Image: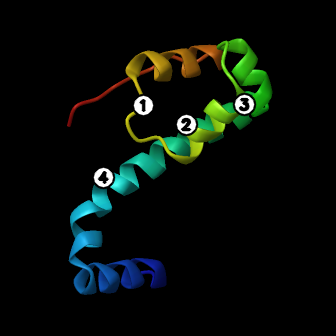
Amino acid sequence: MSDLRLYVEDRKRKDLELAENYEDGFREFKLGVLLKQAREEAGLTQEELARRINTKKTAISRIENHAEDIKLSTLDKFVNALGKKLKITVA
């Protein structure tokens, strides 16, 4: 087990609130990271992407850094502007 995973598991044992909210927080963080990676792979800056979807750079930053409660319509605009398709899986 990695040092990071050991640290997280230890923190979750000591902090019940962290343990209860960890998975949701991690999913939101991961979504933001995936969106940022897709934007960078498309060779776009936040400002360029914002122009494409008619919003502000700060909105793109907020999506990439705090992806909680993002609307599906916004997510769809984001990925379409990158030339990608949105695929949702329920597992």
**Where residue 73 appears, x then y in whole percent?**
43, 15
Residue ID at (66%, 19%) = 55
Q: Amino acid at mark 1?
A: Ile
CA–CA distance in space, label 4 to label 1: 13 Å
Q: Mark 4 highlights which residue? A: 24
**Where residue 24 appears, x then y in whole percent?**
30, 52
Secondary structure of the residue carrying tag 2 is helix
**Above or below: residue 28 compared with residue 6:** above
CA–CA distance in space, label 2 to label 4: 16 Å
Q: Amino acid at mark 3?
A: Lys
CA–CA distance in space, label 1 to label 2: 7 Å
Q: Earlier in the sequence, mark 3 or mark 1?
A: 3
Disc assigned to residue 57: 3
Q: Residues within 10 Å of mark 4 (few under 14, many from 20)?
A: few
Towards the viewer: 42 or 74: 74
Q: Mark 1 highlights which residue? A: 70
Towards the viewer: 6 or 24: 24
| Quadrant of residue 91 within the rendered picture | top left
Q: Residues within 10 Å of mark 1 (few under 14, many from 20)?
A: few
